[in-house]
Image (spheres, grey):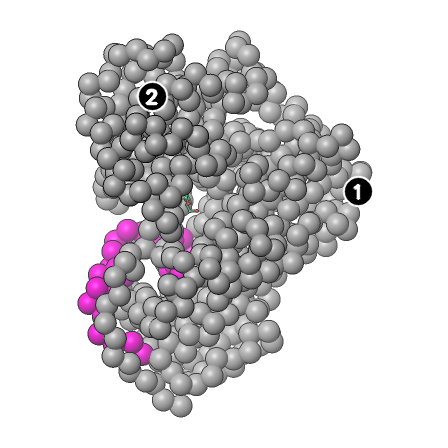
Amino acid sequence: MTTIVTPTQPIDGQKPGTSGLRKKTPVFMEPGYVENFVQAIFDGIGGAEGKTFVVGGDGRYFNDKAIGTIIRMAAANGAAKLIVGQGGLLSTPAASNLIRKNKTDGGIILSASHNPGGPNADFGIKFNIPNGGPAPEKVTEAIFAATTSISEYRISDAAAPDLSVLGTSDVDGMVVQVIDSVADYAELMGELFDFDAIKALFAGGFTMCFDAMHAVTGPYAKAILEGTLGAAPGTVINGVPSPDFGGGHPDPNPVWAKELVDTMMAADAPDFGAASDGDGDRNMIMGRGQFVSPSDSLAMLTANATHAPAYAKGLSGVARSMPTSQAVDRVAADLGIECFETPTGWKFFGNLLDADRATLCGEESAGTGSNHVREKDGLWAVLLWLNILAAKGQSVAEISAAHWAKFGRNYYARHDFEAVEKAKANDLVDTLREALPGLVGQSFGPFTVAGGTNFAYTDPVDGSVSENQGLIVAFEGGSRFVIRLSGTGTEGATIRLYLESYTGPDGDLALPVDQALSEIVAVAYEMIGLTAKTGRSEPDVVT
Ligand code: G1P
Ligand code: ZN
């Protein structure tokens, strides 16, 4: 077998965003597109010679072909070993665990997360570093720089092995180990949680619906929930991963996980509901007749985490992305632990977790996780909720009501405006940014502006600075809105407007969310000049 050195030229736009490189699938399928980017990963991290990597993806269309290319390129670049999930499948948190557990040099994860999959949908590739987490900016910048100066890539002409068969094979002198996609992850979950308590909960008749959304968590959820923990067969729905996620949009929110929402809102709803996304790192939590916002879920998990064995000694600290509601801040203050506000994207939590400054982390975009891996983890969040429900013997509704009665409630929603012309979106953000300093002290409807910030973050561990991470308009009394442009979209610009209205413990804690937010929505739309600048008056998606 030989290594073929293929001359190539830089391809525009191979710049990793919030979470790796995401493009339309046909773009990734263009000749040389995957090859250029994978070579740039190897070049950007100082070569692959003698290294071991984990490789796997969420099973979306083109996952198998791209993995075949990666295997042949890793061999040609001198890698020693690849650990690959069976069938090319690994959830993102499972990949993170394998990278850490095997002390590898990192991993390549193929996913466009919650974006749809298929020949005309989305695809993505990202590199994770040896701590198991997404590459930080200095690494993604080096990879991007390599994409702009690339002149050749290396690929073996050996055939990639059959990934459906467990075991070890040789590709041009490199070892490829195909492993069970679920086993290591399931073992880790068993170490973190009180599985006996959760088993007893299910044995006592507790009912649950887990929507795997035709994506990667199906096999994980079936093995752990129905297999190990004894949840009734059929607890996991849409549990077989498919290349186009059953034609759906594998995003666990009330819009896209409608089947679960309908089940949980029905008169005969199960006790607990949950869903996870394309690659298994996001989660949605529901009680009977109730949606728990991801920001509230983070706060409630933080307040109750000591019920799980892994966190029984308490949390070192907690971190949330800036647009995530401030609900968890109140819990951290009560517990007397540090609370960090980071830019959007899981990569910003890595240093805090490595340095043991934070134990739990979360994002409003359905991401929650802990120091057990370096990615957010959908099933982990579901299992922590189950552990807490089992230990407290309370329902989701009882836990939420008690939480709000103690801390007050941060009513919260995110409005997304998709496929906006980039120039118009940039103009809207630029205009607000320039206006920020002059807004303080001004009143809009019932709100008085307390602060206007162009959010920048200085990493407390390595001192690196990330600027222009979103605009915050904070009002007196704890309400606020945040605006930023998406870094994962693949079409035009997506404007994300995050709305948060705080009601203290003595206020009305049981309002419908849209009612509680109606005034701040109107004020925010007006202040950002939404309709004047974009022609839009309604969001495309509310989560
Ligand atoms: C979105 C979410 C962000 C998350 C990322 C990757 O990024 O908002 O919280 O970390 O996906 O899952 P965005 O499109 O907003 O840049
Ligand atoms: Zn995801």
Residue lying furthest bottom: 1
Question: What residue do we see at 30% from left, 15% from top?
Answer: 449
Q: Nearer the viewer, residue 31 or 314?
A: 31
Q: Earlier in the sequence, mark 1 or mark 2?
A: 1
Circle 2 sits on which residue? 526
Q: Are marks 1 and 2 in contact (CB under 8 Å)?
A: no
Q: Is residue 180 above or below residue 477?
A: below
Residue type highlighted by circle 1:
Ala
Crowding at dot 2, Cα within 10 Å, few <14 / some 14-19 / many 20+, comes out as few
Quick check: which quadrant has ligand 1? top left
Q: Which residues are magenta?
A: 125-154
Residue type highlighted by circle 2:
Glu
User: In the image, is residue 103 part of the stretch drawn in magenta?
Assistant: no
Image quarter where the N terminus lies is bottom left
Q: Nearer the viewer, residue 55 or 480?
A: 480
SS at circle 2: helix
| Whole-percent x, y for residue 134 in the image | 38, 53
Crowding at dot 1, Cα within 10 Å, few <14 / some 14-19 / many 20+, comes out as some
Q: Residue 196 lies in what quarter of the image?
A: top right
SS at circle 1: helix
Q: Nearer the viewer, residue 304 or 538?
A: 538
Question: What residue do we see at 23% from left, 68% from top?
Answer: 10
Relative to 103, 197 lies left or right: right
Q: Is residue 455 above or below residue 356?
A: above
Q: Residue 125 lies in what quarter of the image?
A: bottom left
Circle 1 sits on which residue? 203
| Whole-percent x, y for residue 245 in the image | 57, 55
